Amino acid sequence: MNQFIEKAKLVLTKPSKFFEGVKKEEGVQPAFTYFAVISLVNLVLGTAASYLFLRSLLGTSVSLPTLIVSYVISLLFAFVVAGILHVWIKLFRGKGNYAKTFQLYVYSDTPKMLIGWIPFIGSLIGSVYGLILLIIGGEILHGFSRRRSIFVFVIPAVIVIVLAVLALIGSLAFLTLMPGLSSQ
């Protein structure tokens, strides 16, 4: 367990040094094992936070089988997200292979996994720091310049934010225009 703690600490405090070391890492197995551990930490802490905060607000809780299924799906989904990210990186002539993209995705997700469970602010702070890690790791693992790495990773983030805001506005407009739905 100490190796995971040390790895997370290095990702968060010395990302350039960390990603330089990742250049020597072979395949996806070390990154996947790390991701499985930090995802489990996120699941446990997120479940505890949800239980403490949301249960008192909503009166609901999640069953153990649901937690297990969601954990397994999140592990499998990491490969899909890394695949999409890899296609995006290749469009911008990134030099690394899929394994480097998987490592980049997993390690840059560290802040979100470790503090994303904190209600209201954890996910935002974790996502912003994760974006910074993507930029640093993209330079090192895919050979981007700093400017290109910022461009490659900030564009999708802005698109996602704009789409989320539009979806929120659309949902609020729909609820406002349909008063019969909101009163039921």
Image (cartoon, grey):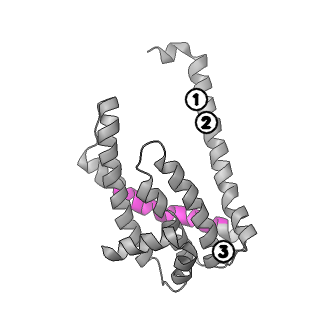
Per the rendering, the mark at residue 167 is: 2
Q: Distance between the Cα atoms at labels 2 and 3?
A: 32 Å
Examine the rendered structure and indicate whether residue 170 appears above or below residue 3: above
Query: Does residue 69 show up?
Result: no
The type of residue carrying mark 3 is Glu
**The residue stretch that appears in magenta:** 71-88
Question: Is the Cβ of the residue at disc 3 closer than 8 Å to that at disc 1?
Answer: no
Q: Residues within 10 Å of mark 3 (few under 14, many from 20)?
A: many
Determine whether the residue tagged by mark 3 lies in a helix, strand or loop.
helix
Whichever of callouts 3 and 1 sits on the residue coming sooner in the sequence is 3
Q: Which residue is mark 3?
A: 139
Tell me the CA gap for discs 3 and 1. Answer: 38 Å
Residue 84 belongs to magenta span? yes
Query: Which kind of residue does numbered mark 2 sit on?
Result: Ala
Q: Circle 1 is placed at which residue position?
A: 171
Q: Label 1 amino acid?
A: Ser
Image quadrant in which you'd find residue 95: bottom right
x and y percentages locating residue 13 in the rendered image: 50, 70
Residue at figure coordinates x 37%, y 71% from the top left: 5
Q: Are marks 2 and 1 in contact (CB under 8 Å)?
A: yes
Residue mark closest to the camera, 2 vs 3: 3
Magenta: main secondary structure equals: helix
Q: Residue at x 68, y 71 (%)?
A: 90
- Location of residue 51 by image quarter: top left
